[in-house]
């Protein structure tokens, strides 16, 4: 199938994929949202980006987003972790994703035993049989709002070096089909990462054949891919079009024409200059500048050219009518922000994308704390990896005795992942209360400093 035909098929599938299941509601104050999945979830980025939006856009709506991912997991392993890892987090909302690992890997390279339609059906059935246990368990927990999420895609079409598991995406589609059917059957929420992200890949690869929103391994999205996932999730929640603020001032009439999600007071206009006190009820969304996924160079801002995030989620619009022709300088709290023409100001400027405003700098502090929180939370994910991917197989799940720790030490040289994760496992076992207190302290600090402040805005004609 060529790329144009595949794109048309994906558009058709995406158009009908969301029909029938429950509309996804925005999170509410007090929610405990657990994202359960594999290594893509364990990376902690898309969940962290979603929470960051709530931290900045709804500063009074305190909630918690919790990582429940473990690298390498398939549906059966997620089921195994429900009672020991996921449900003890007491979710009010549980979002579950799987499919990348369930759909297999190197089987697609075996020329002597290729993945036939019959073999593909067997792979899909294996995943479904495991998922059926998850479904049955969650149906008995009506107090938890369940969301199923179709996996981010395996990118077969990017022109990248290395193995290509041709046919894997088709198997993933079979898994997505039963996930969607389950969401409809149970009136659960559903978010599709697979089709929109594949559509973006195919569209952008027409311009740059090496483009991918996954990564060099075609599997793990980098920071940009995770941000696209966060965008798709928030959009499914119906939050697109909710401005940071939208303010319009008539300078000639000395009047506030519009004030959406903001309060304007003490307005003055004289000699072409305008000033007022400005309190937005939200903060701009701060963008990270570092690559956060191992061996993936993507940074978050690389997603902005391919998704309309700024237009739909990050507009802090400020407009002025009634200005004389010419250029004007804008100051906030006495700080020079920039210069614009009267025509540009009449059309409106987006303060949210200006990184030198006091409100953006406030948002950056929240970003830094949220990144630190994610780093602390990762210790727990490493702890649970040791429990489920190592100790469970030794009959020592949640033992944490000297025998368990000796077993870990005796295997550390031949198990690279155990070696990587042991330090965090030890810290949780030995200092779990301190780690928990640090995490809670970071969350408390975020919700202390995330309240928008009143700023003095001044507009002066440039002489």
Image: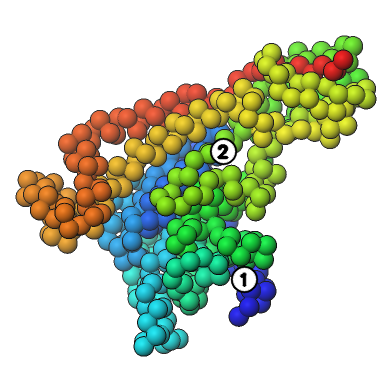
Q: Between 163 and 388, which is closer to the camera in this rendering?
A: 163
Q: Between 10 and 302, which is closer to the camera in this rendering?
A: 302
Q: What's the CA distance linking mark 1 and mark 2?
A: 30 Å
Furthest-right residue in view?
A: 325
Vertical placement of 373 versus 195: above or below?
above
Residue at the disc numbered 2: 287
In this picture, residue 390 sits left or right of residue 214: left
Furthest-front residue in view?
A: 161
Q: Position of residue 192 (x, y in %)?
A: 54, 61
Query: SS for tag 2?
Result: loop
In this picture, residue 208 sits left or right of residue 298: right
The residue depicted at 23 percent of the width and 32 percent of the height is: 433
Front: mark 1 or 2: 2
The residue depicted at 16 percent of the width and 54 percent of the height is: 413
Image quadrant containing the C terminus = top right
Q: Position of residue 427 (x, y in %)?
A: 21, 38
Q: Residues within 10 Å of mark 2 (few under 14, many from 20)?
A: some
The residue depicted at 34 percent of the width and 43 percent of the height is: 378
* Pointers 1 and 2 in contact (C-beta within 8 Å): no
Q: Position of residue 364 (x, y in %)?
A: 53, 30
Judge whether residue 308 can be spotted in this image: yes
Label at residue 10: 1
Instruction: Mark 1 or mark 2: name the one nearer the start of the chain.
Output: 1
Q: Between 368 and 176, which is closer to the camera in this rendering?
A: 368
The residue depicted at 12 percent of the width and 49 percent of the height is: 409
Query: SS for tag 1?
Result: helix
Furthest-left residue in view?
A: 403
Judge whether residue 143 can be spotted in this image: no
Label at residue 174: none
Image quadrant containing the N terminus = bottom right
Q: Position of residue 130 (x, y in %)?
A: 33, 70
Vertical placement of 149 versus 367: above or below?
below
């Amino acid at each position: 199938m060529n790329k144009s035909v595949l794109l048309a098929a994906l558009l058709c599938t995406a158009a009908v994929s969301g029909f029938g299941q429950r509309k996804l509601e925005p999170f509410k104050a007090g929610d405990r949202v657990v994202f359960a999945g594999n290594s893509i979830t364990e990376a902690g980025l898309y969940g962290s980006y979603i929470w960051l939006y709530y931290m900045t856009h709804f500063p009074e709506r305190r909630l918690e987003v919790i990582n429940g991912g473990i690298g390498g997991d398939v549906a059966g392993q997620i089921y195994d972790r429900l009672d020991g890892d996921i449900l003890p987090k007491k979710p009010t909302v549980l979002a579950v994703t799987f499919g990348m690992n369930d759909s297999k890997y190197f089987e697609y390279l075996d020329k002597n035993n290729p993945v036939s339609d019959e073999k593909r059906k067997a792979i899909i059935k294996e995943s479904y049989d495991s998922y059926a246990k998850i479904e049955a368990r969650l149906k008995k927990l009506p107090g938890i709002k369940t969301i199923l999420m179709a996996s981010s895609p395996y990118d077969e079409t990017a022109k990248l070096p290395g193995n290509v598991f041709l046919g894997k995406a088709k198997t993933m589609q079979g898994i997505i089909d039963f996930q969607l059917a389950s969401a409809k059957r149970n009136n659960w929420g559903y978010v599709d990462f697979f089709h929109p992200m594949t559509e973006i890949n195919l569209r952008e690869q027409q311009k740059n054949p090496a483009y991918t929103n996954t990564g060099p391994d075609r599997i793990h999205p980098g920071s940009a891919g995770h941000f696209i996932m966060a965008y798709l999730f928030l959009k499914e929640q119906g939050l697109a079009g909710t401005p940071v603020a939208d303010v319009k001032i008539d300078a000639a009439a000395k009047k506030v024409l519009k004030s959406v999600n903001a309060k304007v007071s003490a307005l003055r206009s004289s000699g072409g200059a305008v000033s007022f006190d400005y309190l937005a009820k939200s903060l701009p969304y701060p963008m990270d500048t570092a690559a956060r996924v191992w061996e993936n160079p993507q940074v978050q801002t690389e997603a902005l050219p391919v998704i309309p995030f700024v237009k739909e989620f990050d507009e802090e619009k400020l407009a002025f009518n009634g200005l004389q022709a010419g250029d004007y300088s804008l100051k906030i709290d006495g700080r020079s922000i920039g210069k614009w023409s009267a025509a540009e100001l009449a059309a409106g400027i987006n303060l949210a994308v200006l990184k030198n405003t006091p409100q953006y700098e406030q948002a950056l502090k929240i970003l830094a704390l949220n990144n630190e929180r994610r780093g602390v939370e990762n210790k727990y994910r490493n702890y649970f990896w040791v429990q489920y991917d190592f100790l469970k197989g030794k009959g020592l799940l949640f033992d944490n005795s000297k025998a368990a720790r000796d077993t870990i030490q005796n295997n550390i040289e031949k198990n690279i992942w155990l070696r990587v994760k042991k330090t965090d496992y030890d810290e949780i076992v030995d200092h779990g209360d301190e780690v928990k207190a640090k995490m809670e302290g970071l969350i408390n600090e975020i919700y202390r400093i995330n309240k928008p402040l009143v700023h003095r805005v001044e507009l002066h004609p440039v002489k």
